Image (cartoon, grey):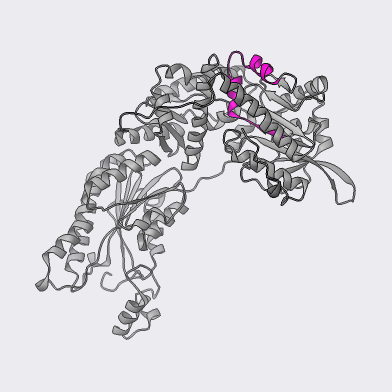
Amino acid sequence: MKSLWNDKEASEYKSDLALRVYTSRLLGRDKSLVLHGGGNTSVKIKVKNILGKEEDILYVKGSGWDLETIEEAGFSPVRLDKSIELSNLEKLSDPQMVNELKTAMTNYGSPAPSVETILHAIIPFKYVDHTHADALVSITNTPDGEKFIREIYGKKVIVIPYLMPGFDLARYCAVEFKKSMNKDIIGMALLKHGMFSFGDTAKESYERQIQLIDMADKFLESRKALNLSYAASKKPVEFNREEISVLRKNISKAAGSPMILFSDTNNKSLHFANDKNISKISQQGPATPDHIIRTKRLPAIGHDVAAYVDDYKKYFERNAPKARDKKTMLDAAPKLVIDKKLGIISTGKSIKDAMIVSEIYDHTIDIIYRAEILGGYRALDEFDLFEMEYWDLEQAKLKKSGSAPVMQGEIVLVTGAASGIGKSCVDAFLKNGACVVGIDINPDITTIYKKEEYLGIVCDITDEASIEKVLNQAVLKFGGLDAIVLNAGIFPKSMPIAAMDISTWNKVMQINLTANVELLKLAHPLLKNSPKYGRVVIIGSKNVAAPGPGASAYSASKAALNQLARVAALEWGKDGIRINSIHPNAVFDTGIWTDEVLQSRAKSYGLTVDEYKKNNVLSTEVTSHDVARLAVEMCGPAFAKTTGSNVPVDGGNERVI
């Protein structure tokens, strides 16, 4: 492990707090040191208060901030003297500790201080760094972990047995510091937890952390346990997407809300899932206590969610009587599923949550195998796991999580999504918390959004094999499908029936009608397994009710699609799937309506462009965003008891009315 400190970069950070930001980000860059909000850093600074008096203030990483992206505002300013005084108390519950630390803050608008604030306060150095380095927890999660640590570091570190983060850990460390501290000590190793380093400068504290973890790396290397390799699978990944959608439905039921399932099919995950000892090595608990809230106590092996939930409830019942009067929120749904075909399937209320779980467990697999080489992986015992998972402070966070977006945890497929109404639908569903699969023949579909909640796929909807691939990719990335917006279509140039080109007619029918039949047929099993029941929104046309001359192919295709929707509503009602149609008209903010076309059309009616756009009963302009908003509503609770409906979005058309 090498230091990332750069004198030129560091010179741009002028204050003690700014340098604290710099070295915190250096730590955050390395995922083998900290993951997703893990780790902690602090700096002690003398600050003049409003009365002009100097105070010693501890700036400690605040709750909710990530070291990789932290800013000065991410540090909570806490009065150092009070923090140290709290460490002298005989007892202090964690909720009381949090309250006392809040009262010691000098800026009410700052984030809540870390639960390790008191621990940072009692360490008698200006800068303190704390990581959950993979190398360290690989070594300490073994039967001989403490012996190995003392062998590696000698007198360079104070060794602390596992204690749950919070007041008890801080108080224990305060005693150990007074007893053990000397000039050779540069760090503190917390068994099964992490490594602290400290120094008088930001550089010293940071580089001591790197030095200590590098020593752990070299120890692992000497035991041939540092650089692990995982052979590539000889077989292509094969899976049944309907089976995965059933798994998602059952996990969502256990969780009480729709869940996203992310399948990690890399070589490491597949190797781990197919390990002959998987039932032993995977059932030891997470690598550090910080990970248990994300990954839960144990992963599920296989798809039997009911058995996992039953086992989880028994685990709760075994430990709850021994715990300190815990009023808990029991969530028995697995966060991880080990699948022989797919590797590791992680779950979350959002794709971001699921992918965080996936990344944490990716590191955990390495830690488990390294520990196995060193004598066997041994994580926390069951009671310690329970204490951490149902910690008062974590339960308080869950209760404060607030209301979720209306479509959080749901997956929507939008066809013709690269522009116009389709793109507006993608926007609207993303804003309402959904994950969206956008497909289009336009290659731009893959790059119009750069966010994990969006998956853009180039697809010719008339090609069945392409649709199969789309559905497979949707299931691998998100776990299933909850709703489809059938928007893709073409409007050929005006052509009277007497002059109809049958090849044009067939092409319009193939794209506007037949392709949608095929997609619905293939997607039906996934929609049937939607946790909140499937939904289909058809983007129809005013031409269904009021066709115009020269548009026979388009009008007939849209009318047939509308009839298909009505039949599907009848057939799929027993599966809880609802199908509703939107019939837009005169939606001018789409690609086919250029300024030139608009001016030409308006002139032919003797109207200005603005008058032409509002040439309807309500004298209002209809946009693609208006259509998209209704599409979202049709997939939400407002339309929960509606199917087979036809709703115009046209400002009122006299011919339709």
Residue closest to the eye, 161 or 628? 161
Specify the segment rendered in magenta. Answer: 129-153
User: What is the x, y in percent for residue 524?
Assistant: 26, 42
Quarter of the C terminus within the rendering: bottom left
Looking at the magenta stretch, what is its main secondary structure?
helix
Q: From the viewer's perspective, is 339 left or right of 315?
A: left
Give residue 54's position: percent from left, percent from top.
Answer: 88, 45
Up-down relation of residue 197 to residue 430 (above or below): above
Q: Residue at x 70, y 35 (%)?
A: 207
Residue 144 drawn in magenta: yes
Please give the name of the residue rendered at 43% of the width and 27% of the height, measured from the top-left corner: 230
Q: Is residue 363 left or right of residue 472?
A: right
x%, y% of residue 550? 18, 73
**Does any portion of residue 261 appear in the rendered image?**
yes
Going 40% across and 20% down the picture, which residue do you hit? 275
Q: Is residue 457 above or below residue 273?
A: below
Q: Is residue 513 magenta?
A: no
Determine if residue 573 is in view. no
